[in-house]
Amino acid sequence: MMDKWINNNTISKILALAVAVLLWGMVHLDTGTPSSTLTVSYDNKVIDNVGIQASGLDESKYVLSTMDTDHVKMEVRGQRSVLTSFFADNYQAQLDLSGLEAGTKTLPLVANLPNGVELVSMTPSRVTVTIEEKQTKSFDVSIVSKGKPNTGLQLGEPVVAPQTVKVTLPKSQLSTVAAVQGAVDTEGISEKFEQKRVKLKAYNKKGQELTGAVIEPSTVSVEIPVTQQTKSVPVKIVYSGELPNGLALSKVNANVKEAIVYASQDVLSSLSSYVTATLDLSQLTEAGTHTVQANLAAPAGSDKIEPGSIQIQVTVVPSNQVTDAERTLSGIPIVVQGAADGTTATITTPADKTMDVTVKGPQDMISNLTNDDISLVADVSGLEAGQHEVTLKIGLPKYITQSGNASQLTATVNIESPSTPAVTNPGSGNESTPSGSGNKGQERPQEGQSGQGGSSDAKPGDNAAAEDKTNPHNGADSSANGTPESGQP
């Protein structure tokens, strides 16, 4: 019987219609249509921190500089199922700035709510805004480099294109712009730096970036030349150690006469007139020609020196086979040392405060001597006020000796104290105290003067060639006043 009902076409249609009506009723149960048999639930909801969205301002001319608040609180009403289906960011308070110019104004807010939700209240419902006019000004572009180039290189002045750009900001901020800069990374570069697009930023006097600045153009191209900072300086050989008794130097010849120092410009400008290589004579134990490797002393503050070492060809012969050469060096400055506190010591004779000195030694060493290798010191320690003839002490390089009578090296020194009238030297037209020769401790920086009645302020290497005064033939020391001197390597 049941099978007949189911297979009946009319009965099937009736059942399908009944199911359709039932489904339609379920779908439209919560549509809000009044029903005598269905009750719909409505609720209120408070939403805090609803953002204010401003629109309509002509941003090519104006900027919204201040707004007394950037959020509001809303109370809304709607069906419970609708309210729970939306989040806080689905609600907005809209602010219309269309057609407004610079100034301060109080404007109404309009709530923008999801469908099915109505506004109960909004706090605040009005906001006060300040609109500021934008202004544009031209600024020069500066480039800041970060990092150091390779050793021995120095960055030149950046070449920027374009050199000026326009910056647009609110009037109150534009006056605070202190610089428009771009930054480039020059760490380890070895050739000319080039970058086509360097982004620019505007900064105030405190170095803070002005994030709202509109810069036109926003990028520039930058080229930075790179120059090699070097200086070619002579190589001077200085000596340490001693030759065995009975041996003497005959020839000393280095395969490199000049070295290249890589350093900053400040270091290069303050370099001494030469760099040194130390020859250790103690390793030469027999006569003959020897080749010795010696390192070059890199000046303080330099990046590197090329070459780092040199080869020195040294000829050592028996002492009785050496024929010394002589040479006279003119204009060696005389330095006064040892003046008591409160006194002034002035060289009056010779008038030019210099003296010629004749020296002798191995030919190669004599040929390479300069005035900087020789020092003349007038030691006035213990002398009272008045004129004194002082025997000079001479400082010579190792294996160089004075030729002639040491007692001939004298100078007349006038010593003045505050209570002693000046003594005029008839042969001198200048009674003033020369710079570097009067006050105690004033002297020409010079090594090789230890044991000569005065101390030296010279740094190591300033005159290393004048450190040792040993006679190449018999190991005796030489000084103008006959006092043996101990040279320092």
Image: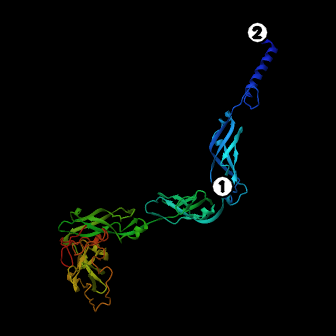
* 407 lies above or below 487: below
* Mark linked to residue 3: 2
* Front residue (pair 438, 56): 56
Q: Secondary structure at mark 1?
A: strand
Q: Quadrant of residue 307?
A: bottom left
Pick the front one: 420 or 245: 420
Q: Is residue 147 visible?
A: yes
Q: Is residue 154 left or right of residue 420?
A: right
Q: Which mark is residue 238?
A: none
Coordinates of residue 152 in the picture (x, y in percent): 43, 63
* Residue visible at 44% across and 66% down in the picture: 229
Judge the density around disc 1: few (<14), some (14-19), many (≥20) Cα neighbours within 10 Å: few
Residue 13 in percent (x, y) is at 80, 17
Q: Amino acid at mark 2?
A: Asp
Q: Is residue 395 above or below residue 200?
A: below
The picture places residue 93, in percent across and down from the top left corner, at 67, 47
Query: How does the figure colour the protein chain or chains?
Result: rainbow
Is 249 left or right of 59, judged from the image as shown? left
Residue 329 in sight from this viewpoint: no
The part of the image, by quadrant, that contains residue 251 is: bottom left
Which of discs 2 and 1 lies nearer the camera? The answer is 1
* Residue type for callout 1: Thr
Q: Quadrant of the C terminus?
A: bottom left
x, y (%) of residue 120?
69, 42
Disc number placed over residue 128 in the picture, else none:
1
Q: Could you say which quadrant of the image residue 448 lies in? A: bottom left
**Which quarter of the rendering shows the N terminus?**
top right
Indicate which disc, 2 or 1, sits on the residue closer to the N terminus: 2
Q: Residue placed farthest to the bottom in the image? A: 426
Above or below — where is 91 with respect to 397?
A: above
Outermost residue on the top side: it is 1
